Amino acid sequence: MSVIDVFHAAADTAVNFAGVIPDPDPVQPPGTEGVTIILSWLKWIGYVVVGGAIIVGGILIAVSFRRGEGHDALPKILWPMAGAIVIGGGAALVGILAGA
């Protein structure tokens, strides 16, 4: 019996065991409705802060270009956009993992 045969046998066994393991739907425990409300509020606050940061960054970019300091302009927009990506990605990842 070669190493490859051992790996194939292990893979077949894993597939057979995976069919036996139950996969119940996620159910929120009773009394934890406040947690989802807090998370939705935090997500909303995060988007408001990011939106405000992008607007303020745009204003600062306009003023910087007018003064000839445009080389510092790009990070003022990119970092808030990166924050929006992290917030949205985190919310999406939790939704995927929770099966929602």
Image (spheres, grey):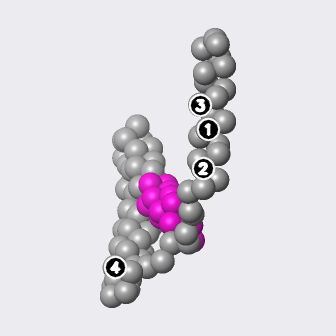
Give residue 48's position: percent from left, percent from top: 41, 72
The amino acid type, in three-letter code, at marker 3 is Ala
Q: Residues within 10 Å of mark 2 (few under 14, many from 20)?
A: few
Which tag, 3 or 2, sits closer to the chain's start?
3
- Alpha-carbon distance for marks 3 and 2? 12 Å
Query: Is any part of residue 91 visible from this angle?
Result: yes
Q: State if disc 1 and disc 4 touch (CB < 8 Å).
A: no
22 on left or right of 66 = right
The amino acid type, in three-letter code, at marker 1 is Thr
Q: Residues within 10 Å of mark 1 (few under 14, many from 20)?
A: few
Q: Mark number for residue 35?
A: 4
Residue underneath mark 2: 18
Residue underneath mark 1: 13
The amino acid type, in three-letter code, at marker 2 is Ala
- Alpha-carbon distance for marks 1 and 2? 9 Å
Which tag, 4 or 1, sits closer to the chain's start?
1
Q: Mark number for residue 10?
A: 3
Please say if 41 is above or below 63.
below
Q: Secondary structure at mark 1?
A: helix
Q: State if disc 1 and disc 3 touch (CB < 8 Å).
A: yes
- Residue situated in front as seen by the camera: 45 or 9: 9
Does the magenta segment cover residue 97? yes
Give the magenta part as a residue range. 84-100
Which tag, 4 or 2, sits closer to the chain's start?
2
Q: What residue lies at 51% left-to-right and 60% top-to-bottom?
A: 97
